[in-house]
Image (tube, rainbow, N blue to C red):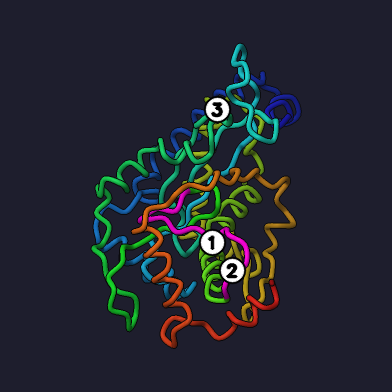
Amino acid sequence: DSFNNLSCIVFKIAPCTIGKIITDVCEAIYNILKEDYLKTPSIVEEWYKIADGFWEKWNFMNCLGALDGKHINIIKPDRSGSEYYNYKGHCSIVLMALADANYCFTYINIGAKGSGSDGGVFNECKFNEKLQNNQLNIPPNRPLLNREKEIPFVIVADDAFPLQKHIMKPYSKRNLTMPEKIFNYRLSRARRVIENAFGIASARFICLENFSPQKITTIVSAVCVLHNFCMRRTQNLYSPTSYADAEENGVLIPGNWRLESPEELISLAPVQTQNATNEAKEIQKEITEFFVTQAGEVPFQYRMCRYNN
């Protein structure tokens, strides 16, 4: 519909011509801006800067980013069978992204077919391969504040991802202890940045659905890099204070993007419970214990966990 509106009403140009112009422009935007505005950290100092942001803004130490994936609806390609159908019954491709503490994307992966298992999408992307093979130049292990045990830097995610050495997800068992509830709350708080990054981008650029896989990959890449550009150069206009989610004494105040976003992007489905390594469980346990120490706690966490129980 958006192409038809542009072609017939605004420019009086054939839809196929408008489509080519838009994808060519989006490709140029991405190629020109990506080195400055959408570059995954490659040196330790860059990762430290991101980790400092998560500790200062979201009280989560040793955090390198918030990870999530969204299904983006597409026009079903001819003769594609069911390979693009996701668990909701829509044709889609997957946008996988990592965000820093300031709602900016630091990594994107677009194009996995919607029918793939959601855990498999991440397992097969290059970022995870480099993460598992220690090829991202992330900082060495270090203890949390006033703790002795050294633990790795981690990425926060939800139940769509497996618990791993460098990926922390919520406890999913029943009858959680208070420290485990606090861990889930604190992780959710830090992970909210990727939810807001997706939400702000989709609300500001209402063009993220119902194109062919080839076009949507190009368009979404441009949207992500333009989102970062606007967040860094014109944030007061692009995402003013009330636009992103905010907190008041720990209570979530929904951002205005939630009122403007045309339709919520479909989240990845939770992966089936997998046996995490003992190392991953010990890291999760260490962070859990840290969050109930004087150095690691925030004053409103107990009230929020009782309130949300």
Query: Residue 53: where, in percent of width, then height?
Result: 41, 70
Q: Which mark is residue 215?
A: 3
Tell me the mark number nearer the camera, choosing from 3 and 1. 1
Give me the residue at 69% from left, 66% from top: 254
Secondary element at tag 3: helix
Dots 2, 3 in contact, CB < 8 A: no
Dots 3, 1 in contact, CB < 8 A: no
Tell me if residue 289 can be seen. yes
Q: Which mark is residue 176?
A: 2
Mark 3 vs mark 1, CA separation in Å: 38 Å
Which residue in the rendered view is the most extreme toward the top?
A: 79
Residue placed most toward the observer, 132 or 34: 132
Q: Amino acid at mark 3?
A: Lys
Q: Amino acid at mark 1?
A: Tyr
Question: Considering only order in the chain, which callout, 3 or 2, is on the residue closer to the N terminus?
Answer: 2
Dots 1, 2 in contact, CB < 8 A: yes
Query: Residue 188: where, in percent of width, then height?
Result: 56, 64
Query: Residue 170: where, in percent of width, then height?
Result: 53, 60
